Amino acid sequence: MSESTLFSDLRSRAQLRVSASEPDVTKMATEDVATLVHELRVHQIELEMQNEELRATQLSLDVTHRRYLNLYEFSPSGHCTLGTDFIISTVNHRLSDILGIERKKLMHYPFLRLVYAQDISIFQHEIAQLLKFKKQISFDLRLYRHDQTIVHSTIYATIPRQEENHTDQIEIMLAINDTSELHTKSLELRIKSRAIENTLEGVMISKADNTICYVNPAFEQTTGYTAEEAIGRDPSFLKSGRQDATYYREMWNTLINTGSWSGEIWNRRRSGKIYPEWLSLSTIKDDYGKVEYYVGVFSDISTQTHIRERLHSLAYYDGLTDLPNRHLFHDRIKQTLADARRSNSQFALLFMDLDRFKVINDTLGHNIGDLLLVKVAERLTSVMREVDTISRMGGDEFLVLLPKTDSAEDCCLVAKKILAQMEKPFELANQLYHISISIGISQFPKDGHDPETLIKNADNAMYRAKATGLNCYQVFSEEMNQKMVKRFSLENDLRQAISKNELEIYYQPLMDIEKGHRFGAEALLRWQHPQKGFIPPDEFIPVAEENGLIVELGNWVLFQVCQQHTAWRAQGLDIGRVTVNLSPHQFLQSNLVQSIHDILQHTEMDAELLGLEITESAAMPNLEYSINTLERLQALGIKIYIDDFGTGFSSLGHLKRLPINALKIDRSFITELPNNQDDVAIVSAIIAMAKSLKLQIIAEGIEDEAQLGFLRSLGCTTGQGYLFSRPVDVAAMTAMLQKQ
Ligand code: C2E
Ligand code: MG
Ligand code: MG
């Protein structure tokens, strides 16, 4: 009850009493007043209590209001209230913060001016919806900051309830959340995921239980598996099996311990084809360090691997034959050496060199030579075991490494197999060629303790094989080594022999055995070594032949002979035709004809009085070349003799085609005449054949009358031998000519 109503009530009650009992007015009035006072007190107390309640309510309202204000002001969202005219009527701190505009300025500010121009229609549309349906709505809106930069925001708009029915006083409350940072992050994320989707590198993400949860398009393209096929599976389904369990174990160890791993992995595509990839793995951990995801990024490196393999192949393999080259061979021999030392085992080396390869190369051309080398390499490979290494050392030299080969017998067996392989002719440019090979064998540890010595000694043994007569093998021995040392010093001395004037030409007369007089002579080279004494040509000519010195030496001989011949003629001495020996190497010199021509001119020698002796083995391998060269020599007037006839393997068909003038029957067939029936038969046949081919026939090495008589009986016209004269020096020859 309010104070005014209380007093009016009291007054009316007092009046009622006065009017009802006039006589006792005074007495009654006193009583009433007391009651009234009492009541008044009661009322006063009630009033005070009500006041107290009111104050408490006010206080609590104040607290609530303050709390609300705090909440409003310091809310993480910006807040403002707008009228339907969009003029701001209240605004909190946070919104002023977000926009960077003072709160004072924002009060009564048109909200639309804060809205990013292109978003105004959105705002208007959304608010129209709000006013229509009166339901809280939210939408994204861009606002301007004070500096005209843009704030991305999400807005929650609502109409406070009490105003719902008074449309003319409607207030719109906006809660504005700054989502700029979120927006930037989501943009970044979108860019990154776009990058992952578009990168050429495969990306695969798997969960902690190692099941794939994401793969990108490059993964699909590289592996051939679609995302649907891959997701949910363990990545091991991609394994090629090329790397063993240890490799993967180490990979996992590194990944777990360091958080990342990278290396080469061979995987298998859906098509079944295996390919190498460069894989980088890393872990993604939660805040407590527990692995949540594994991320794998890989690139297909088949092309790089191919290039790398090609480079490796170029560095370690012979480009022509595809056999390991010198470098790789050295690696292998070092490895084998270390293994042999560790296991106390033995191994062997085979050094091989094609016989007369130069002839093929020089006469048929390098292309055919190369073709031959490829074919030889194929044949060699076909005889070897998997563990053996065959290498081309360059030119026509091949080396074979035979690991775990303990006995010399085993080595010889391999050598025999190789020789047998070479027996079949090689087809080159539609023609068949017989090629042989010489093999030298050295063994560890017997013949050396390091690769260099072992190779050198196998090479020495190979030289020995060549010297023994080609197409064979030789096992290295210490005695052989001594010979090699000797040979090496011989070679050295020979280089200086010409300049030191240690060489001399001897002449051995040729006899007309029918008429018994001398005509012509053969020029034979002599070397008088100042320390070693006389060295026979059989010993040093092969050395000169091998190191190429023979060309210089041969030219020197020719020059000396021609010069001497002219000198004798000038003295009125007639020696007749002098023959000079041509070595196979010399015969193959492309400028041979020209240089002989030059010597003849320079020494004014009559070409008709010069004969050249070549062996069958020099003339036969390349018949076309020989025919051509010999024809050109004959065109100069020179006569051609086949020396040591019978020792080679000439086919008579070929012999017939060669433009030659004479055959010299090798001494080995003469020595045992007339007692050895085989030799009798051979020599008779040769003489008969020479006659039918209209060739002059000369018997070499006639030492006694029996031989001479027999040869004469067969119709042999010319002879040479100690029976008539040993080879003699110029002085002796001059004396002989003068006596004539
Ligand atoms: P060849 O051309 O067959 O020379 C004949 C060899 O037989 C000579 O040996 C000669 O001294 C020897 N001889 C001749 N008659 C008799 C005999 O009745 N009994 C014996 N036991 N031997 C006889 P030589 O001078 O030692 O020459 C050996 C080989 O060296 C020659 O064989 C020839 O192939 C080569 N030679 C010598 N001089 C030269 C040269 O200037 N150039 C080239 N390329 N080779 C040469
Ligand atoms: Mg000769
Ligand atoms: Mg001879």
Image (tube, rainbow, N blue to C red):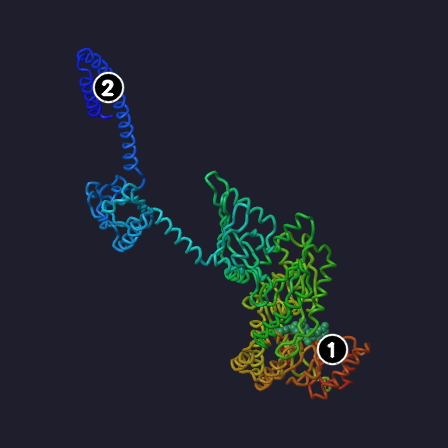
Q: How many marks?
A: 2
Q: Is mark 2 within 8 Å of ligand 1?
A: no
Q: In which quadrant will I find the C terminus?
A: bottom right
Give the class, few, some or many, for how many residues have Cα within 10 Å of label 1's Cα (few <14, many ≥20).
many
Q: Which residue is under mark 2?
A: 44
Quarter occupied by residue 160 = top left
Quarter occupied by residue 493 = bottom right
Q: Is mark 1 within 8 Å of ligand 1?
A: yes
Q: Tell me which image quadrant ligand 1 sits in.
A: bottom right
Q: Is residue 197 left or right of residue 32?
A: right
Q: Earlier in the sequence, mark 1 or mark 2?
A: 2
Visible residue check, residue 726: no
Near-viewer residue (566 or 409): 409
Mark 1 to mark 2: distance in Å?
A: 176 Å
Q: Is residue 202 above or below residue 53?
A: below
| Position in image of residue 566 (x %, y %) | 56, 81
Q: Which residue is under mark 1?
A: 702
| Position in image of residue 342 (x %, y %) | 66, 47
Amino acid on which disc 1 is placed: Ile
| Position in image of residue 33 (x %, y %) | 20, 14
Q: Is residue 311 left or right of residue 528?
A: left
Q: Is residue 576 above or below residue 370?
A: below
Q: Does dot 1 land on a helix, a strand or a loop? A: loop
Amino acid on which disc 2 is placed: Gln
